[in-house]
Image (spheres, rainbow, N blue to C red):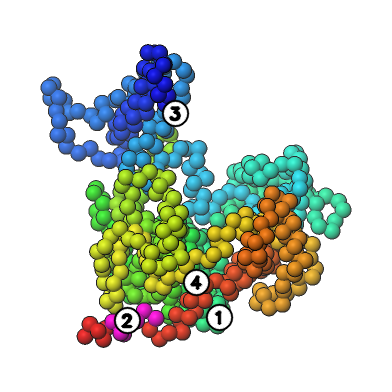
Amino acid sequence: MSENKEQNTLAVKATKREIWLPLFLSLAMIGGVLVGMKLKNEPLIKASPKKNVSQSGAEEIIGQGRMEEILRYVDAKYVDKVSNDFLVDKAINNILQELDPHSVYIPSSEISKVNEELDGEYDGIGIETMNFGDTITVVTPLADGPASKAGLMSGDRILAIGDSMAIGKDQRWLNYKLRGKRGSNLKFTILRIGENRPKSIVLQRDKVPVNSVDGATTLDDNTGYVKISRFSSTTSREFMAALEYLYDKKGVKNLVIDLRGNPGGYLDKAVDILSQLFPEKDKLLVLTKGRTVHQNEYKTSGRQRYKVDKVAILTDEGSASASEIVAGAVQDWDRGVIIGRRTFGKGLVQEPYELYDGSELRLTVARYYTPIGRSIQKPYRGKTRQEYDDEYEKRFGKGELTIQDSIYTADTVRFRTAGGRWVYGGGGIIPDVFIPIESYMRNEYYQNAKSWASEYAFQYYVGHRKELKFNTWQEFQRNFKVSDYSFSEFLKYAERHNVRSIWNQIIAVKEPLRRQIKARIARQLFGDEGYYGIMNESDPCIQNALYQFQKEDPLGLRRIAQRRN
């Protein structure tokens, strides 16, 4: 707002109105939301006995309709035309910002997109694409998706969709064209590698899975690895399929679960995962408590399908919510070793409430606690949402991502695990084994160039697919090397896409970039198993997990027991 003292009186009044109007709308919106919910059959918040009674004896209503009254004045008298929907959305967001960082309002236009990842599916055809020059090209038809069943192949160039030419169009245009009602047909005109004439393929839109288990592979003869990217409605089923592959077909005994970068999701799916790690029935895994909701305890099912021996959970500063439930329960019961870096620190539980116009309020209703009573929610009072979300940079600046002794927790209260180890709450799960962030992850050139590794690797695959004759990703790992010539071509490719060459930085990240290219070629040949198989061989967290599994007592529980006795 302007503070120019030479403004005339009317401008000053207008400025004051601009300052106070959002605040008034925010306060009034509280009443509007609550009153609106009261009128629904299933209200968000049940009316509690009113403490204040007017002179007439009628109970006062929170807000007293001020929201609607203000909007009528704005609509009738305000100097400029303003959308009431816009004002309402702003007011709601201002209200929620005064509560906590995880209570959010989602407009009806965004609900479908927000829910897709948690629903585990969407209606479409199931292809991953990239733009090469002016042409959209199929990178991967998703397994068992409509595109794969109809015969679309990796490398197919999309010339037209229906009657619309695709040449020169971008990914946004493509996404608009691909989405549609399940069961409806879509016609593609494509040009296939090695063919001179375009061909038509007609496919039917259907449900397309959005996988939450990104990869399942072996690390050695005894150890399986599962990467979970989020906890969606299909995570339990995907996780069991991964265990079936690893335990029935590969005969592994130990298990590494990678939750790095996993932002969470459905709490009950985290409980399902934990029930496969504990054979006992009714073992407490997590509990939730709130002001207006009953305390809920979530326990193991006692239906463990596979005998999982040693367990390691990989975490980092991007592991949040349901990821922390898994790590916290494993740590509290000394079921396995937590490896990596301190987790995000989200211990708040949201419940969704659909509003009358199809929008949704996701409101924090409780806090969750680990089995021994730790709250791992990091502090948020007195912080803006931006400050709260930007804690990664603060952690790095304080040295926490590189030096174990720099780890800070807001809660100094200590808790004992089942085996007698000291642990803390109040700001995420602190790992049992600290692994610093690798230096190349903070390298400017690496961060800019790696985003082009996938495209370059795909082009390499298309141009050399006849030469890439390998039966397994392990054979590929042993016998394929990204040559100096190919790496030089990648640097040129990145530079053509405005990644400025910084040679002292390139030298420092040459091997990590080679590994990225090789892993992404492996993904074209062997799927996610090939990708993670290549990446894991040089991953310090993975290597430490294998080292811990060689120990008879990785958590030192016997030594603690001897001291306590």
Which residue is disc 1 drawn over?
Answer: 220
Tell me if label 2 and label 3 are in contact, CB under 8 Å.
no
> How would you rate the neighbour count of disc 3 (Cα within 10 Å): few for under 14, some for 14-19, many for 20 or more?
few
Position in image of residue 80 (x %, y %): 46, 17
Vertical position of residue 101 compared to residue 466: above or below: above
Nearer to us of marks 2 and 3 is 2
Residue 395 is marked as none
**Nearer mark to the viewer, of 4 and 1:** 4
Q: Earlier in the sequence, mark 4 or mark 2?
A: 4
Residue at 43% x, 76% y is 311
Is 66 placed left or right of 231 in the picture?
left
**Which dot, 2 or 1, sits closer to the camera?**
2
Left or right? Give the position of 158 relative to 15.
Answer: right
Q: Residue at x 72, y 60 (%)?
A: 490
Q: In the rendered structure, which segment of residues is drawn in magenta?
A: 554-560
Residue nearest the observer in this picture, 321 or 193? 321
Could you tell me if the residues under marks 4 and 2 are in contact, i.e. CB atoms within 8 Å? no
Q: From the image, tell me which residue sits under label 3.
A: 85
Residue kind at label 2, given as amino acid type? Leu
Residue 208 inside the magenta-drawn segment: no
Calculate the distance from the C-alpha at mark 4 to the C-alpha at mark 1: 15 Å
Q: Specify few, some or many for label 2: CA neighbours under 10 Å numbering under 14, 14-19, or 20 or more.
A: some
Q: Identify the element where label 2 is drawn.
A: helix
Q: Earlier in the sequence, mark 2 or mark 1?
A: 1
Callout 2–callout 1 Cβ contact below 8 Å: no
Which circle's residue, 4 or 1, is located before the other in the chain?
A: 1
Q: Which residue is mark 4?
A: 541
Q: CA distance from mark 1 to mark 3?
A: 57 Å
Q: Check the image and name the residue furthest to the right.
A: 196
